[in-house]
Structures are given as structure tokens and as C-alpha cells.
Amino acid sequence: MKTIKLLYDEGYDLFCRDINDDDTESVIPEEITFLEMYLEMYPEVTKLDILEIIEYVFLVHFNYPYISEKSESDETMLIPLFTYTNMSNDFHASYISDYYHIVGHLFLSGYIDFMVEAPIETLLSNYMEDKYKAWLHFRDNFLYKERFNYYGDDVMLYNGKIYTNDTCPYVYENGIKKYLGIAPTYSSTSWDDPTFWSAYNVFTVATKKGMDYFEKELAPRIYQKYKDLEVEVDDNYNVIRWIGHVNNKI
């Protein structure tokens, strides 16, 4: 048996505690996602609670970089929600949809941004005069197709034609097979052509407005709400008894 907390400190990822001055560790195993354990710890949870905690976890990951520094999108957007296999399909699909809605709200509010590097570094917020149209273009071609979890190792481009690893022309140099094509998902891309968008060439960018919102409003509110939520679990992380509580009046 062991005792675990949802939040060990303000601004921390869920179920993460200090192991030294520079790093934290999760108190739950990798195969259990934050949402699974959260629902186990807080059975009276509401839909609003779940959406709030998804936004919190997303911004914890999104705001790790310094303001205006870009990160590969798989590092920030592939939150554990996507690996939660114990949900029913309908329940899972519902919260994936809610997650995308949260991302859209944060982008349209200026709390987060996205960037590509061709022909020059261009933020999604500056891509079109109509920011909402830019968002729809991004949502439909990047989020709905889960390009933040796509690496394009199966696609090669040669002389303007698309090949797979099996069909791409190649030569042998010093006995080593060398493809004549390149993997376009590793190269710079533009907002105009989503064909080769991937986790490698569409970046996430933290903004000052978003960092301020997280540090001054969201993180303190979430910490005060859940700082006393503590449970005792068995070796399989099933809750044996509740020791703490949720401060719903925050």
C-alpha cells in the first residue's frame, strides 16, 4: 500500500513529485494515465472538472519551453489522454474532441501559438488575416489527422513524386543502400501545404500571455483546489480509502 497525491506542488504535472532540484518523477506507472487515475481518485468529478484538468495538463506540457521558443509538437501536444485505452470508444472520442476545443480556445485567445519554418518562420496567428480561418485550417489538417503523432518515416519524396520505402528508387554506395528520395516530414514546411505536416516540422510556441495565465491564474487555482486530495492505493493503484478532499469552493 502507498499514499499518493494528485498535485505535489503548484505548477507541477499531475502525480509528479521532486526527486532532486532539477527533476520530478511520476508516482504512478506509465501504463496508467493521468485521466484514469484522476477519475479513480475523484469519483464525484464533473465534466467541467475534467475539462479544467485537461487544460491544466496541456499547458503544463506546453509551457515547459521559454516564451517564444519553439518545441516539436509531439513533445507538447501528445498528452497521456491519447493512450488511455480503458475508456469506452464514445467516452474517449468525446474527450479527444473536448481537448481539441480547448486547444482552439487557447490559440484564439492568444495563450498559445504554432509555427512553421518555410518559406520563413511564420506563426499560425499571422498566417491569415482571419485568425479563425487559420485555426480551422490547422485543426482540420493537423489535429484531426493527429499529425503531432506522425513522423512520416513511411514517405519519401523524389523528383516531385511520393514514394514509400518499398518503392523509392535507391542506389548502393560502398555496399550500403541509399534512398534517392528524402523524407519531407523532416524538412521545413509551410502553412499552405499540409501534405507533409508532422511532429517534426510543425512547432508549438509558448506566449507571454499564456504563461502569465498559467502561472498567475490557472496553476494557483488548480493547486488550491486539489492540494488536499490524497488517497491510499494498493499495489495495482486501486483506491483503498480517501484521506484528503477536493476544495470545491476555490
Image: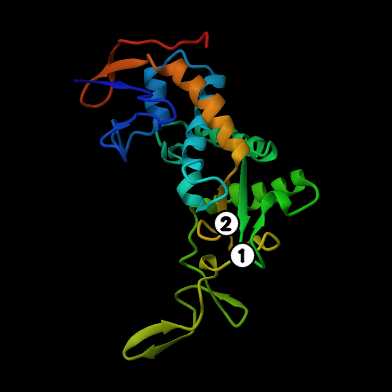
Helix, strand or loop status at disc 2: loop
Residue 247 screen position, x and y as percent: 46, 10
> Quick one: which residue is furthest to the top in this view?
249
Quarter residue 85 falls in = top left
Is residue 197 something one can see in this rendering?
yes
**Label at residue 112:** none
Residue 169 screen position, x and y as percent: 49, 84
**Label at residue 189:** 1
Whether pointer 1 and pointer 2 mark residues with C-beta atoms closer than 8 Å, the reply is: yes
Residue 250 screen position, x and y as percent: 52, 12
Residue at the image point whose x is 61% and y is 65% from the top: 189
Pick the residue in front: 32 or 221.
221
Quarter residue 22 falls in = top left
Residue at the image point whose x is 28% and y is 30% from the top: 27
- Tell me which numbered mark, 1 or 2, is placed earlier along the sequence: 1
Q: Quadrant of the N terminus?
A: top left
Residue at the image point whose x is 57% and y is 49% from the top: 68
Q: Amino acid at mark 1?
A: Thr
> Quick one: which residue is furthest to the right in this view?
129
Is residue 51 something one can see in this rendering?
no
Give the residue number, with chain letter if any, for mark 2.
Answer: 202
Q: CA distance from mark 1 to mark 2?
A: 8 Å
